[in-house]
Image (spheres, helix red, strand yellow):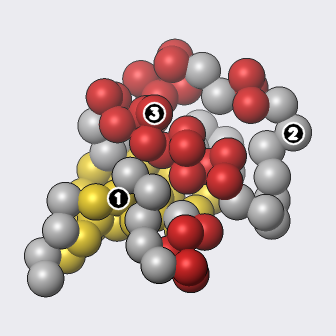
Amino acid sequence: MDRHIRPARFEERDCLSEIRFAVQENKLGDPGAVTDAHYAWFTAHPGIWVWEEDSRILGFSAGDTRDGDDLGIVSPSCAVGGPIC
């Protein structure tokens, strides 16, 4: 099994959004609040790191160095049989 944590890539934003919107706790009130511009900034600085196993993203963590906000998300599907991306 190949496992690692690595910086996220901008082109993975759809997968990261899918994981983010699938959680039941700490739900995002407005899905439109996270834009491509947000992903571009976070991936350029690198503020998003993904947990990946066998080329599938299982979760991610994000940290904003501008204000200290942080977030850690694991795909809810990991609890029921596997990743969604």
Taking 15 as reference, is 23 above or below it? below
Residue in the image at 87% along x and 39% along y:
29
Quarter of the picture holding the N terminus = bottom left
Taking 2 as reference, is 14 above or below it? above
> Considering only order in the chain, which callout, 3 or 2, is on the residue closer to the N terminus?
3
Q: Three-letter amino acid code at disc 3?
A: Asp
- Is 20 on the left or on the right of 29, as rendered? left
Residue, disc 3? 14
| Residue 44 visible in the displayed image | no
Disc 2 is placed on an element classified as loop
Asked whether disc 2 touches disc 3, contact meaning CB atoms under 8 Å apart, the reply is: no
Q: Three-letter amino acid code at disc 1?
A: Ile
> Considering only order in the chain, which callout, 2 or 1, is on the residue closer to the N terminus?
2
Percent coordinates x, y for residue 38 in the rendering: 54, 25
Q: What crowding class fits label 3: few (fewer than 14 Cα within 10 Å), some (14-19), or many (20 or more)?
A: few
Residue in the image at 42% along x and 73% along y:
82
| Residue 28 visible in the displayed image | yes
Residue, disc 1? 57
> Camera-side residue: 64 or 23?
23
Q: Give the spatial CA distance, label 1 vs label 3.
A: 11 Å
Image quarter of residue 12: top left
Percent coordinates x, y for residue 17 in the rendering: 55, 39
Residue in the image at 28% along x and 37% along y:
9
Residue, disc 2? 29
